[in-house]
Amino acid sequence: MAKVTKFCSLLHSTCGLKEAFEGQYGANRSIPSAVSTRWNSTLRLVEAVTDLDPQSLNTLLEAQGHKGLCLSAREWSQLKELVEILAPFLQATDLTQGEKVMTLSAALPCVLSLNSHLNSMLNTTRHLAGFVKALQKSLQRRFRGIFANVRMDDSAQPAGDLPFGDMVYMMSALLDPSFCFFWLEQDVLAPDEVKSEVKEIIMDLVLAEARKVTILAESSSGEDNKDEEPPAKTPRLFTGYRKKSKKKDDHVSSVKAELIRYIQVCSGEEDEADCLGFWKRNAKVFPRIYLVAMRVLAVPATSAPVERVFSHGGLIMRPHRARLSARTLSSLIFLKCNHSVA
């Protein structure tokens, strides 16, 4: 790592090395600089270096008088392993820090998928087995509440008191058609009966929230009229009994039917579904589940989008712009944020 970061620093500060590098690999090829506050920038730096041909890179470094920065075969193999181990963490970071997308629903699947990834890496890694074990231990400790909720952690402490033990992570994963219950089948390392128990718990949570939702009379009147039987020509005894019981159970059964139908639709999707697009198309198909999804999925997984707004504000509100009005400043921040997202 010291050799790679030193090489990158020289590449961005020494004209001779930069010209030789562009002559060897082309003007469009570059190595990104690392930012001390962004771990993923360091990984992108290492990934860019390992994409180069090791023999030609060592030849270039020797020719430029930097023989001490040449990488041995073992060091090169270690760096390749490091990129392979941390690449999914980079993807998870990008997923949970996105803007204008649902991020909370990705939290639980990312954590469980990373745990499965580290399990598989333990069987294949040659040089960094200790690093993988430490990383997995840290992941399980930091997100202990998630592992407890899916019955992968035998903690005597209630899951709600553990870090990330809130049930909203499980509900949001179910309500995102990209994840639904796929993570439960693939990444929950538990017996099938435990998986079934977890599945029932999550469905009960969503149903409990959906039953609190009140649908406007205009949107539900059409469905209610379709379900009603035509009036009999002659009055019958005890007809009111059945109608009353039907109205009592109608809301409960319709909510459960909506949820089951939603799970079936998600299971039938061949391609990865866009969460926002899916709920926009199916808002009337699953009206009660839709309202629950809009409440749950609106929660951001991290504070990164908010921090970006303050960063943009600091870039715009400089001392020589001290006379900016509040309206102008807010407009500039809005334009800057939209430009960065695009």
Image (cartoon, grey):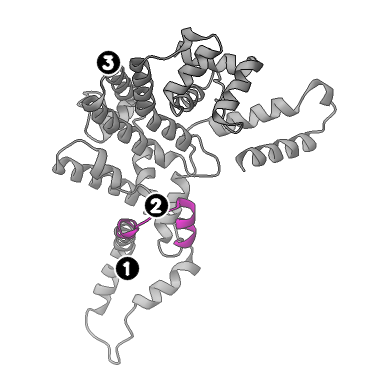
Q: Magenta region's main secondary structure? A: helix
The residue beneath circle 3 is: 130
Residue 231 placed where, x, y %? 33, 86
Residue 283 placed where, x, y %? 46, 61
Q: Where on the picture, by quarter, is residue 211? A: bottom left
Residue 266 covered by magenta stretch: yes
N-terminal of the pair, mark 2 or mark 3, is 3
Q: Residue furthest bottom?
A: 233
- The residue drawn where x is 44% and y is 62% is 282
Relative to 258, say whether 137 is above or below: above
Say which mark, if any, is on residue 272: 2
Image-based side of 316 in relation to 227, left or right:
right
The residue beneath circle 1 is: 247
N-terminal of the pair, mark 1 or mark 2, is 1
Query: What range is drawn magenta here?
Result: 262-282
Q: Where on the picture, by quarter, is residue 138? A: top left
Taking depth in this image into account, of 328 and 187 the one nearest to the observer is: 187
